[in-house]
Amino acid sequence: MPVIHKRTDYTIDGPDLGTPITMHELQQLADRAGSHYFERGTLRFFRSRIGATVYTRPDGWYFVTSEQFVGSSGAQPRRYSLRKATYKADGETLTFTIDTVGEFQAYESGRAAARAVPGKGDQ
C-alpha cells in the first residue's frame, strides 16, 4: 500500500519526474508535502535506514530502505526494500507518494535491492 501525503496550503513547484535529484532534495520535497516519511522519529521507530542514492527514472525516483524488526525474541536481521517516490503538483495541491516496489523487505542486501531498480542495466 502506498504512503500518500497531500498538502494544500500553498503553491509549490518542484522538479519534473525524470529530473535527477539528490536524496536531500527528495527529503525536502517530502517535507514540503507534509510527509513524515523521512523524519528522524519515524526512522527511529521503524529502525529504518535510507540509502544515499536516488535512481532517477521517467516515472519517479527510486531508492533503497532497510528496516529491522525487534520483537520479544530480539532483533531480526535487517532487510531491504526498493521504494519509488512520485509527486504531482496541481495548483495549490501537492500529492507526494512513496510506494514499495515489489515485496516489503524482499532483499537481503541494499545492493540486491538496488539491482532491482527498473532499467538499472541501462545506465
Image: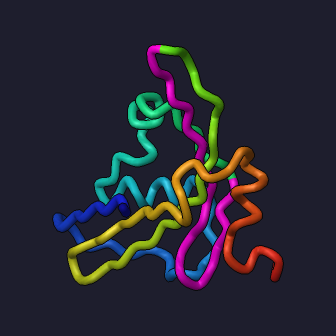
Q: State whether residue 75 is above or below residue 30.
A: above
- For this orientation, the residue located farthest to the front is 73
Task: Please tell me in which quadrant of the rendered image residue 63 appears.
Answer: bottom right
Residue occupying the point 82% across, 77% down: 121
- Does the segment drawn in magenta span residue 88? no
Colour logic:
rainbow
Query: Where's residue 117, x and y in %?
Result: 68, 69
Which is nearer the eye, 107 or 115? 107
| In this picture, residue 122 sits left or right of residue 28 | right
Residue occupying the point 59% across, 84% down: 58
Residue occupying the point 63% across, 60% down: 22
- Does the segment drawn in magenta span residue 60? yes
Where does the C terminus fall, quadrant-wise?
bottom right
Which is nearer the eye, 13 or 1? 1
| In this picture, residue 23 sits left or right of residue 37 | right
Task: Please tell me in which quadrant of the rendered image residue 101 appears.
Answer: bottom right
Q: State whether residue 94 is above or below residue 50.
A: below
Q: How many marks?
A: 0
Identify the magenta region.
53-72
Q: Of helix, strand and loop, which mostly describes the magenta segment?
A: strand
Query: Where's residue 50, x and y in %?
Result: 59, 45
Q: State whether residue 88 is above or below residue 82.
A: below
Query: Where's residue 1, x and y in %?
Result: 36, 61
Which is nearer the eye, 18 or 79? 79
Query: Where's residue 109, x and y in %?
Result: 74, 46
Residue occupying the point 76% across, 55% down: 112
